[in-house]
Amino acid sequence: MRHVDNTGLTAPEKWADRAAKELEKLQKDAEDADKELTFREMWREDAIRDQLIALMDKCWYCETKFVRSPYHVDHYRPKSVVVGAVERRGYWWLAYDPTNYRLSCHHCNSGGARYGNQSAGPGKGARFPLLGQRASEGESLDSELPVLLDPVVAEDAELVGFDGQGYARRRPGQSYSDHEVARDLCRVDETIRMLALNSDLLVESRSTLIGRVDGLVQLYLTNGDNAGVALYARNEIDGLTRTTAEWSAAAAAAERLAFLAHDRSGDAAPSHAGTGGAVAAGASGGIEPPAATAAGHDVDLRTLVAALPSEAFSAGGIALTGRGKRGTARASLMADGTIICFRRPLTTPTSAARMATGDDKVDGWTFWSLTVDGTTQTLSVLRDSLIAQDGGSVKDMESQ
């Protein structure tokens, strides 16, 4: 995910005048709480859509470009209805507000992505979970705490990282917010799950791109005596990592990882006029060093895994099971604290349980059970017992 600066987005005067009239009609209809609202789909018009494409000509969520398939103009805050624990009327007053529009591919907005032979779910659609209270008409949206990452918020875009295999995941260097800890979930994991950002197509494409970037970095680094080759490699890297390029966040992550590995090796990088500054700039915005101690054991499993006996992972992973609407769900808890579900890595029990069950309301800590030393218990019970036995040292670890 790349940050999209939409602060300069303005609707053409004629479009805005028509939108204002449509909003007046909605205002009257919304006074009847039981009336179904209807919308004139003005956001599909070129006057708006072309401006969104000009800001970022790819899906703002997954960074995929589509040559033949049209982009969706997604309402970040759903306009007609919000689905969740209780279905309720959506943010109708934002239906014709261009600042609520996000350019989206079909998979992110409406589903269709897959994990092998398994559907990855319905996409964003009308889902818009919050970590706090929902705003009503006339109230400030600044007080809302959306779970879904927003590409127009720079801090949100910075939360997403990638591993060497092309999987999106939370950047380990980023701390969980107090609200995430209070709700036992991670915004990045939930966004990855809801938008299927680790679907087959995306992981394969990002993995290929990461391999290409790594090869170009090596080509650049090993040609200190060949300015032509080094310049070619540098230009290719710059093209793949520019903000508007397809999956460029993963490319930038791969670039930085390659330069970090080179820096640790102690080898000297090539030095050519016009390239040194570009390398420094390019190496500053990708993947981060390995994470320090986990912050917030109520969200992920790293502190819990650290307290388990190493022999528990002798078979590679510990089997997790849970019972959902689809029947028995299975996953594996790995020694690095990740949960493998549908062969996809997730860092939080709740997102893994929701991926396995298709249930947006399940709590993964009480859903998953595992067997250690002949005792079967839920993750929640195991966590609580470890904290009690540890005499508070887990919390001490979190403060470091």
Image: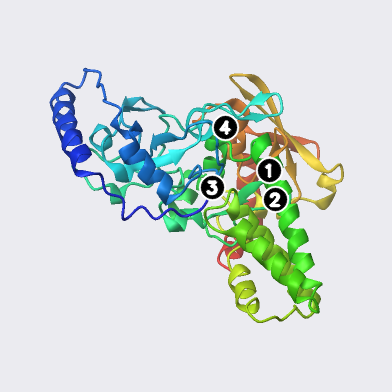
For the residues bearing labels 4 and 2, Cβ distance under 8 angstroms: no
For the residues bearing labels 2 and 1, Cβ distance under 8 angstroms: yes
Q: Quadrant of the C terminus?
A: bottom right
Q: CA distance from mark 4 to mark 3?
A: 14 Å
Marker disc for residue 188: 3
Residue type at numbered disc 2: Leu
Q: Nearer the viewer, mark 2 or mark 3?
A: 2
| Residue highlighted by disc 4 | 354
| Residue at image location 26% in from the left, 25% down from the top | 40
Q: CA distance from mark 2 to mark 3?
A: 22 Å
| Residue at image location 55% in from the left, 41% down from the top | 65
Q: Nearer the viewer, mark 1 or mark 4?
A: 1
Q: Position of residue 156 (x, y in %)?
A: 46, 53
204 vs 17, left or right, is right
Q: CA distance from mark 1 to mark 4?
A: 25 Å
| SS at mark 1 in the image | helix
- Mark 4 nearby-residue class (10 Å; few <14, some 14–19, many ≥20): many
| Residue highlighted by disc 1 | 205
Residue type at numbered disc 3: Val
Placement of 8 over or under 206, stated as above or below: below
Residue 210 seen: yes
| SS at mark 2 in the image | helix
Which residue is nearer to you in this view: 186 or 197? 197
How many discs mark residues in the rendered view? Answer: 4
* Label whose residue precedes the other's in the sequence (4 or 3): 3
Residue type at numbered disc 1: Ser
Q: Position of residue 311 (x, y in %)?
A: 85, 48
Q: Nearer the viewer, mark 4 or mark 2?
A: 2
Q: Position of residue 57 (x, y in %)?
A: 48, 46
Marker disc for residue 370: none
| Residue highlighted by disc 2 | 209
